[in-house]
Amino acid sequence: MLKRRGLILPAFEIHGGAAGLYDYGPVGGRLRNRVNQTWLDHWQSLGNIVEISCPTVTPYAVLEASGHVGEFSDFLTECTKCGEASRADHLVEDKYPNAESLSRDELASLISEMKPNCPNCGESSWGNIVAQNLMFNTKIGAGKSGRDGFLRPETAQGMFTSFTSIYRHFRERLPFGAVQVGKGYRNEISPRQGMIRLREFNMAELEYFIDPEVQPIHDFSSWSAPVCLISDEQGEISMTLSQAVNDGIIRHPTVGFFMGSTMDFLVNIGINPNHLRFRQHESTEMAHYAQDCWDVELLGSYGWIECVGIAHRGCYDLEAHEKATGQRLRAWRTFKEPKTVEIDGWTIDGAKAGPAFRALAGKVKSAIEELPAESSFPMTLNIDGQELEVRDEHVKRLQRTENMAGEWFIPHVVEPAFGIDRIIWHLLDHCYTETEKSGETYTLMTIPEIIAPVDVTVLPLYEKDGMGELAKSIHRDLCSRRNVFSIYDASGSIGRRYARADEIGVPWCITVDHDSLNDKTVTLRSRDSGEQIRVPISELEF
Amino acid sequence: MLKRRGLILPAFEIHGGAAGLYDYGPVGGRLRNRVNQTWLDHWQSLGNIVEISCPTVTPYAVLEASGHVGEFSDFLTECTKCGEASRADHLVEDKYPNAESLSRDELASLISEMKPNCPNCGESSWGNIVAQNLMFNTKIGAGKSGRDGFLRPETAQGMFTSFTSIYRHFRERLPFGAVQVGKGYRNEISPRQGMIRLREFNMAELEYFIDPEVQPIHDFSSWSAPVCLISDEQGEISMTLSQAVNDGIIRHPTVGFFMGSTMDFLVNIGINPNHLRFRQHESTEMAHYAQDCWDVELLGSYGWIECVGIAHRGCYDLEAHEKATGQRLRAWRTFKEPKTVEIDGWTIDGAKAGPAFRALAGKVKSAIEELPAESSFPMTLNIDGQELEVRDEHVKRLQRTENMAGEWFIPHVVEPAFGIDRIIWHLLDHCYTETEKSGETYTLMTIPEIIAPVDVTVLPLYEKDGMGELAKSIHRDLCSRRNVFSIYDASGSIGRRYARADEIGVPWCITVDHDSLNDKTVTLRSRDSGEQIRVPISELEF
């Protein structure tokens, strides 16, 4: 049905297709767009969130700093008979449901013991298990001056590398956030589960920067109903978000706030709240730097699937880029009262260091003043790619008392990351309703109006006597309104056309009949109630 | 200014940057989004246009069929001293302004004669000139089962490979169109000119499918003013679009209609109509299959730059994919009266062919019936990847008269293709206004409200006595409205803050002062008129 009605289709199908790549078709394209825009509106309405947009092609150095070059990989093994690559953990997951967390050695011994068959050719003859990086790689530029690059595995890095610009935009006042909606890439070894595991996916991430020393104040009053939490320590519990924050089950109030706000967004676009739960990462599952992480899991035809991750990432990301680049990615914290600090360290002796380092003397000074008191000279500094030898004569000891008004610190970040394709898949699942009509199965897609891919269908009862022309003029008038999308449909019986509109979730149908020609009224039919009322054309509101 | 104010920034700058890659920052991100959405609205309002969204990672076969593997290239030469790659035509363009159209041999002899210096190291020692394909390449999948792929050089191919789904969506009735907004990639050898020549760019394309035998009817009445046309044959002329269509200067009415509609869009988002002209491709410049092509050129700091191309591509694209895949990418045309056709060809002899070809017999029959009368047997057919030998005994001659109600044909396509980054660059250029205020230069960005990245700035006169709190609550209320984006700004003098808002093109400022606390009114200031009026908070409309 998704394919037949133009919602989601395998991409490049006429060319034989490509696993893990999908199209949003003539109906799905606008659905995707409206989900994205509703997501942006949702976060921007907080008042301290901005949208940015960064390239997907990313230089090696950026993803080396973020840790993706080293750690973004799965274990792969190739069938020695047919050459097909398989994920090693998939081959043994029937017996080991948590095979994803097994080490290379564990996987190797399990495969040699279980002798799983190749899903492609059926033989059982496996090569070595190797860690396969999951980023699509490419070359930026041509010839010998080409540089290694990747397609970004997530949008988040753009928010970190642009931190300075965002910080300046918000007049250097925390907390604030930046969002980005766009493509992410993961070169899956063997994609499965349709829209769940894609090689190119639509994602939407918010990076929210906070001062770890400021206790955040969030209003939890709109989430008074208990939600389903699967806590690392307590297992499945039903509890309000504010209670879970107070009890320390959710380890940071801002994480709890984003959990509630994420739930609002999902329910707003059509997710069934009874098929939504929060699952906390176990400490072994979580990245070492993360302080807390909750997945929003949605129930659909593949069981419970992670569709959003809300992670407290500490200062990990900004610190990693700071280390790799030497650029300051920090915020300024003014002390309530100035602090007196004993400075004990080094500075340069201008008379000697000036002539020695010339244009770089300023940078050498900054670097020397960062050194601890116990440093010894000579030492070699790398300044702007140049190796400089700093000798005893260039420096002098600096000991004094200073009043400091504040300090630079690395903000912490809380990151809600959304898999848009998975969310769309589940909202279609949750909105899909089968009823019976005249003894036959009847399909209805109860997509909320806020994201319905088509707002209204205009149907002439027949395309004669001027009904077609009148219907077309209503259709064109509706299309010309901002953010309104109408379909004109004149093919098949009126019942068949209503059914087609219901199947793709059009909330309203307008029918032009013989009476319309005389009294300028039309029939307005509601998808959800089935109710039909007569409305003057001039009073149609969309 | 673009960088300082968070509009457009070099990407990954803290990591040393990457030529040809840019970020849209905290202000530019929403500008880009609104331009994209306004573009989508503009075309969808026509009533027969749908949005689709396809992957950027594209298998080799698709881009081989489209001709990009063979023809999407520039001539490259490397400096033998420093290894830097340069575009051969760039090295000689000082003397040959149209160097782009020179052949490899012409470029080689010019370079050996002119001995241009390497822009990187200054030496003049050049290697061979080679054709360098401009697509970013990558591998889809891992190991030996990985397949070659590219990042798409344009969004258009997705509309062609999805043609069948779009055709079905429109109930098989031409004309209709599909649009796509997204990333395109071109691995430039040596990117220059900032936002004009990017390696990853935002593009927006419409593919509009028409029946070449139906004379289109378009309404040109809203474009009564003459426009600047640079015609292939007549040079620069000033003429209305309808006149140019009637005179055959614009060679197809649908091309003329899209030229007008494109101009409306551009002027609507802030392009100065006096800095816009249409330039027709010369016949030598145009692709061999194109029937007409007009660029929309905008005047900015780089001179006249092509920002939109509007091309009549004939049946080239669908035919190319049909040939490569064997799938039908056609529309059905019903004859006004059924036609009588003499069929003279071949069909299968079921009694012999059935047992011989079994499951494939049906496909063999279709293939045989497509063969011309003069075919001879035995012949080898490739059906579903299998080589089949069709012998005399499997076939029989088919000669009969048939009444045909209609026929399948390949639709023609008219394609307006927009470079969104170039358009944004020029609209910022055209909206940039320098005036004088108190003897100093004062910058104003007169971005139209429809795409303004920030709709309103809320300013407390001071952050004390409750003015800050009141301003914040107004700010939050505005942000919570759909499609409204507000900034809260409390840093610096009020004049400085107005200037900052003017500089990024915020159309309205709201100031909260002491009076606001008592009478619940605020000052509403217009960017363009400078006028300030007093408005009750409850009556603020955005």
Image (cartoon, coloured by chain):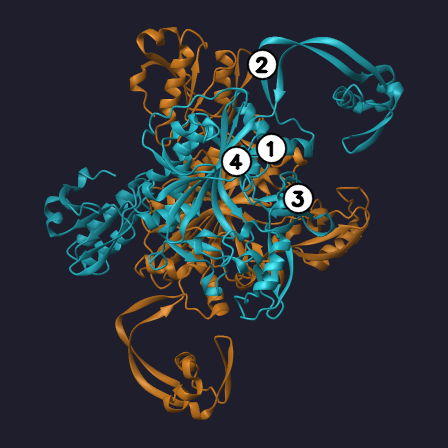
Chain colours: A orange, B cyan
**Kind of residue at disc 4:** His
Question: What's the CA distance linking mark 2 and mark 3?
Answer: 36 Å
User: Disc 1 designates what residue?
Assistant: B316
Which quadrant does the C terminus of chain B fall into?
A: top left
Question: What's the CA distance linking mark 1 and mark 4?
Answer: 39 Å
Mark 3 or mark 1, whichever is nearer to me: 1
User: Disc 2 designates what residue?
Assistant: B334
Percent of width and height locating residue B209? 53, 27
User: Disc 4 designates what residue?
Assistant: A426
User: Disc 3 designates what residue?
Assistant: B60
**Kind of residue at disc 2:** Thr
Q: Residues within 10 Å of mark 4 (few under 14, many from 20)?
A: many
Mark 2 or mark 3, whichever is nearer to me: 2
Percent of width and height locating residue B223? 34, 30
Q: Are marks 4 and 2 in contact (CB under 8 Å)?
A: no
Front in this rendered view, residue A44 or A384 = A384
Label 1: chain?
B
Mark 1 or mark 2, whichever is nearer to me: 1
Q: Is residue A70 left or right of residue A328?
A: right
Q: Are marks 4 and 3 in contact (CB under 8 Å)?
A: no
Same chain under badges 1 and 2? The reply is: yes
Image vertical order of residue B252 relative to residue B524, above or below: above
Mark 4 or mark 3, whichever is nearer to me: 3
**Kind of residue at disc 1:** Tyr
Quarter residue B230 falls in: top left
Q: Mark 1 or mark 2, which has the lower sequence index?
A: 1
Q: Secondary structure at mark 4?
A: helix
Q: Are marks 2 and 3 in contact (CB under 8 Å)?
A: no
Question: What's the CA distance linking mark 4 and mark 2?
Answer: 41 Å
**Kind of residue at disc 3:** Tyr
Question: What's the CA distance linking mark 1 and mark 2?
Answer: 23 Å
